[in-house]
Image (tube, rainbow, N blue to C red):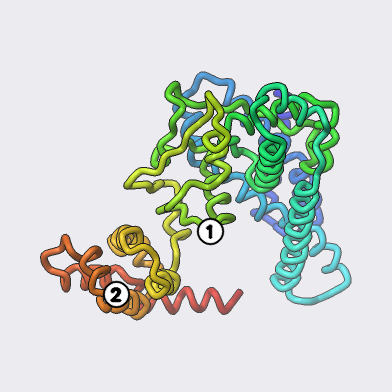
Amino acid sequence: MLTKLFFFLPFGGYVFILMLKNPLSIDTVFYFFIFYLFFFDTLEIIKDNISNSNFKKIKIFLKKYMFFYHEKIIRMIKPLPLSLLLFWIVNLFNDTSTPLIILICYIFFLYVLVTNSNRIKTSIKSYIFPPSIEASLRENYPLLTNKQREEVLNYLRLFLIDKVSNISSDTPSIVLNRTWEVFSLSDEYEAFSYQFFNMDILPYKPILKDSSGIIELPNIEMNFLDIWKSQCYIEEIDPFFPQRVPSMFMLDETLNIADGIKFHIYEECLREELRIEDAPSTKKLIKEIEDGTSQKYLAKKLKYYLGNKSYCKLYIKEELEDLLKKIQKNESLSKMVFGEYSDINFFIENVLNNAMSPAESACSSCSGSSV
């Protein structure tokens, strides 16, 4: 393991220097392709070594800021080396401009990856678990009905589908985690892991929970965050201001699992790690006002978003003005949103001052049109 690591890191540095000197030479493309083949295996080795070390500060930093995002980054980077390889082959027979060929190759491989990911998710959705899984559920949870046992298996499929995109996700349910553990010990699990995840064994992760068995959503664990967002989007719940908990997170409570995890929504249910860019647009907020969404819930959202500079900077002044006018037209909603401010005009002016500047707007539209 360490031999591979010590060989690979200098080799990666050599490839990087080659790319800086001559990014499209035959040698660079060849070495970069070799680098690509071993990249993911080496990343797992680094992760394992870090997780087993005593350097807690480094471990926490990497877990929070690097490994939390690395699956998403890797999904976007994966097509790049193959694109460069195809570019080099095509370029031998064609004089078309370099950027155009690379872009076409990248889009092609990205399309292949996305299509393959969707195909895998569809296959998992119809996967039939071995009979031993249902037998273990019947043995461990004799009070569950046939319908409830089938429900657990369906949620396990949903969880494994989420694993295709978010490999680091944890199960948000004790009964789900134990069912996954039984499946991971079955003879069929190795074939399942290889078929759908291209891994010898998809690692099973035991669930971690505090002694009280209650997790407050504002303090939700990092490993629950990806599946929290994905389940919220599937069930059309706002992950910032959830009016209810996704059904997968409520599974233990719904089935009355004695030592299960209970997820509670609290007044200020916000996550720092949930990026403001994921927030609903001004147009969507206007539609929610028009559709008559619960005003107390809506006012809470509007106060948070309009008071957040990062959110306001995503939109031009006119878009924010439209939203503010819509709020002011609704008298009761306006009182809830602006009620605590002695000078409403000052608050509105402050919101508009935080809007995207014309220069930034022009820049973003130019970059959008160039793509």
Of tags 1 and 2, the one toward the viewer is 1
Label drawn at residue 236: 1
How packed mark 1 is, by other alpha carbons closer than 10 Å (few <14, some 14-19, many 20 or more), is few
Q: Name the residue under label 2.
A: 324
Q: In which quarter of the image is residue 45?
A: top right
Q: Relative to 27, say whether 54 is above or below.
A: above
Q: Which badge, 1 or 2, comes first in the chain's sequence?
A: 1
**Residue for point 69% across, 31% down:** 180
Q: Relative to 145, say whether 229 is above or below.
A: below
Q: In which quarter of the image is residue 215?
A: top left
Residue 192 in the image: state x and y as whole percent. Answer: 82, 37
Q: Quadrant of residue 199?
A: top right
Amino acid tagged 1: Glu
Amino acid tagged 2: Leu
Q: Which residue lies furthest to the right in this view?
A: 93
**Residue for point 61% across, 74% down:** 371
Label drawn at residue 288: none
**Residue for point 84% across, 42% down:** 195
Q: Relative to 54, say whether 59 is above or below.
A: below
Q: In this view, does 345 lie to the left or right of 207?
A: left
